[in-house]
Amino acid sequence: MPDLQLPHHHGEGQNTKFLKAQLSKPETFQTVAGTFKLLDDSSRLRIFWLLCHCEECVINISVMVEMTSPAVSHHLRQLKDRGLIVSRRVGKEVYYKAADTEQSILLHQVIEKIMEISCPD
């Protein structure tokens, strides 16, 4: 990549090449945007947060978040497709919990930090 000449110079010369290289990868930013778009629904966000703290079946999740089972199942499918939660089957029952991945752990931490900052004591 040739040296990038910016119209204004603010002493950022060292990072310009690196920053430009990262900005040239829109698919990376699309992945991040997709994750945040998934969590822009407060119901889905509540379900994800709940599953960061326990493993539950659809019926129990439905009761806890005061939603119908089909609505919860819809949200669970989206969270699972994105890799934020995992499931396991025991007989006819399916249990869900947050995935043990760096992405899920980090999102959980961010959610709790924002809740701590924005929620009154």
Image: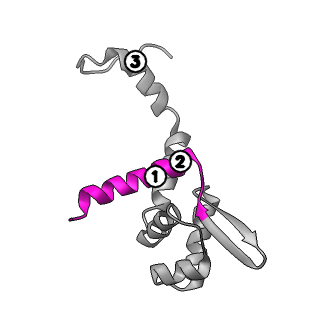
Decide whether residue 30 is among the magenta residues. Answer: no
How far apart marks 1 and 3 lie (CA) works out to 34 Å
> Distance from label 1 to label 2 (Cα)?
6 Å
Which numbered dot is residue 103? 2
Asked if the residue at tag 2 contacts the one at tag 1, i.e. Cβ–Cβ closer than 8 Å, the answer is: yes
Image coordinates for residue 112, horizontal then vertical, percent:
37, 56
Q: Which residues are magenta?
A: 97-121
Nearer the camera: disc 1 or disc 3: 1
The numbered mark at residue 107 is: 1
Q: Secondary structure at mark 1?
A: helix
Residue at the image position 39 percent from the left and 56 percent from the top: 111
Q: Is residue 26 above or below residue 93?
A: above
**What predominant SS class does the magenta segment belong to?**
helix
Q: Nearer the viewer, residue 27 or 106?
A: 106
Residue at screen point 46% across, 61% down: 39
Q: Earlier in the sequence, mark 2 or mark 3?
A: 3
Please determine whether, in this image, residue 19 is positioned above or below residue 55.
above
Horizontal and vertical percent position of residue 1? 51, 17
Q: Secondary structure at mark 3?
A: loop
Q: Mark 1 Cα within 10 Å, few/some/many (few <14, many 20+)?
A: some
What residue type is disc 2 on?
Answer: Gln
Between discs 1 and 3, the one toward the N terminus: 3
Look at the image and tell me in which quarter the C terminus lies.
Answer: bottom left
Residue type for callout 3: Leu
Q: Which one is in front in this view, the residue at disc 2 or the one at disc 3?
A: 2
Query: In front: 116, or 24?
Result: 116
Q: Position of residue 42 (x, y in %)?
A: 41, 70
Task: Kindly identify which residue carries mark 3.
Answer: 4
